[in-house]
Image (tube, helix red, strand yellow):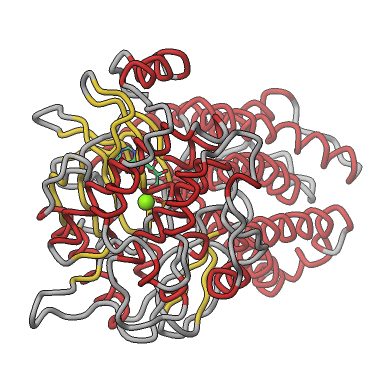
Amino acid sequence: MPATEVLTSSTSATQSLPGGRILRCQVNRPASGGPRTKARVGDDVAEQGARRLGTLAVLTAVSVVGASIVKDLLQPELAAAHETPLFRLNALFLVLASVGLAALQRSGSVRPQTLLDLGLVFEIAGAFTLAVMENVIPRPGDPIQGSTFVSAWIALCSLVIPNTPWKSGAAAFVSAAMVPGAHLFAAHIAGYAPFPWNRLASYSLFPLFVAGWIPFISTRLHEMQKELSRTQDLGSYRLERLLGRGGMGEVWRARHRLLRREAAVKLVIPDLLSRMGSGERQHMQLRFEQEAHAIATLSSPHTVSLYDFGVSDEGSLYYVMELLNGMDAERLVTHYGSQPAGRVISLIRQACESLEEAHDLGMVHRDVKPSNVFICRLGKRADFVKLLDFGLVKALQSPGQVRLTTQGETSGTPAFMAPEQVRSEFDVDARVDIYGLGCVAYYLLTGTLVFDASTPMAMAIAQVEQQPEPPSRRTEVPVPASLERVVMACLEKKPEHRPQSAAELAGLLDRCTDIPPWTPADANRWWNLHRPAAAAGTAE
Ligand SMILES: Nc1ncnc2c1ncn2[C@@H]1O[C@H](COP(=O)(O)OP(=O)(O)OP(=O)(O)O)[C@@H](O)[C@H]1O
Ligand SMILES: [Mg+2]
């Protein structure tokens, strides 16, 4: 099971989230097949374009059927021509292709950009099919005056399907080239004499002109869409790159527009909010707001700094924090394996400092896990720990404050949740964070979770019922007995058997004097060896 399963809120609906996470909410709503969070720049445009393409496909299918029936009624002399296999097969192909494309878009199984590329193939196939259907009946020898419907088709597709100018232009030209091709093909199958070359050229001229406009129109559209995406940036910050996704939303690398300062922006998935009922949304907003306020009151250097907080025009909740240069503990273990005892002590000791301040202010983190323990390069210091995501903080001592975590509600990540948290006990306290730190230490030492379970529920049950195996039995790397004792003490089922505070845990770690300390020189050596870019102070 991934180390980042998330279990929040209490009862009914279970929702899949990216990366195998789950989110449980109190209000019943249909389980969805894993909403992909919208990337904010570019992907938004692709997603909207894909939706428009789905609509175009549906309208094409309806129009082909509807127009054929109405035309036959208005001009019975056409009905015979429309009964030919050539017309019917083409009409059927266009309807099926349209329905297939619409279904593909609805299923959400194809990435929006891939769908847009498929849309260009649809445009070309549609141009050919429409031109064949137009040419089923031989034309009398009159000069060509009007234009083929394919001209309108090319213009329509180019406006509806956003893509890069060169792709849109190429698709438009190939579609225009289908016109003479389809005429010759239809003439051959239907057995009539095709246009002489000058009429064929005249017949093909207008679609070619339309195709000629497309690169210009598409370039302008592309610029407008990019501008639109930019306006969706948050407040004074421009979102640059997605850093990662979590249970509640996404984290973006961002830059202040005026100060040019780099930052990290965490935002709650707008899709997720829009699917919630108003009460649930309000609950989530309060929770998020509290997270921002909680972080803002903390001043430990080992707690991530908060710069800004707000709600975007679209209703996404976001906060802006310092951009950290390094990696979280989960990534450290997945990329570099289990860590030496001295280093684990140094990392957990720093996390204790952050929690000590939070606990003194009456806050419980409740989601201490490897992905929320960030190990960074800060100025000249390597291996500097920053604790992230006081997202599920419960204010213990603010009279009159709304209790955002109600009784019977479970918040946290099963693999790192204390037994009393799993049991949704109302009065969980700072000792759940001590348990969480124990799980993180275990993970850093062994590279494995404390319990081996295949589902979040099995993991939650194991947290309550199963005794953990000592870390030294889970790894070939030596785990000194003194540290093992501290880790096992943190993992005690009963809170009163654990170290009672972060300060006490820090003291116990300080007393593991038999373990060679992880010195600043060790840390620098590690970063220079494994992460030279980060070691040079360049954000990765
Ligand atoms: N301030 C930051 N600077 C750099 N990277 C960050 C920062 N905050 C978070 N990240 C990275 O972004 C990724 C996503 O973080 P996020 O907190 O959304 O996910 P998570 O911790 O896996 O889940 P959860 O939402 O339950 O906390 C993490 O892997 C983390 O390393
Ligand atoms: Mg996190």
Q: Position of residue 59 (x, y in %)?
A: 57, 63
Q: Position of residue 523 (x, y in %)?
A: 37, 22
Q: Quadrant of residue 202?
A: top right
Q: What count of labels does the image hold?
A: 0
The answer to whether 19 appears left or right of 38 in the picture is right
Q: Position of residue 49 (x, y in %)?
A: 46, 49
Say which of 150 and 218 sits in front: 218
Q: State the quadrant of the C terminus.
A: top left
The answer to whether 352 appears left or right of 156 in the picture is left
Say which of 173 and 375 sits in front: 375
Q: Eyeballing the image, is 365 above or below 266?
A: below
Q: Is residue 145 visible?
A: yes
Q: State the quadrant of the N terminus.
A: bottom right
Q: Position of residue 255 (x, y in %)?
A: 21, 33
The answer to whether 132 appears left or right of 223 in the picture is right
Say which of 297 and 285 sits in front: 297
Identify the residue at horizontal 59%, vertical 47% (top origin). 448
Identify the residue at horizontal 38%, vertical 40% (top origin). 512
Identify the residue at horizontal 15%, vertical 34% (top origin). 256
Identify the residue at horizontal 50%, vertical 80% (top origin). 13
Say which of 410 and 273 sits in front: 410
Q: Eyeballing the image, is 367 above or below 495?
A: above
Q: Is residue 149 visible?
A: no
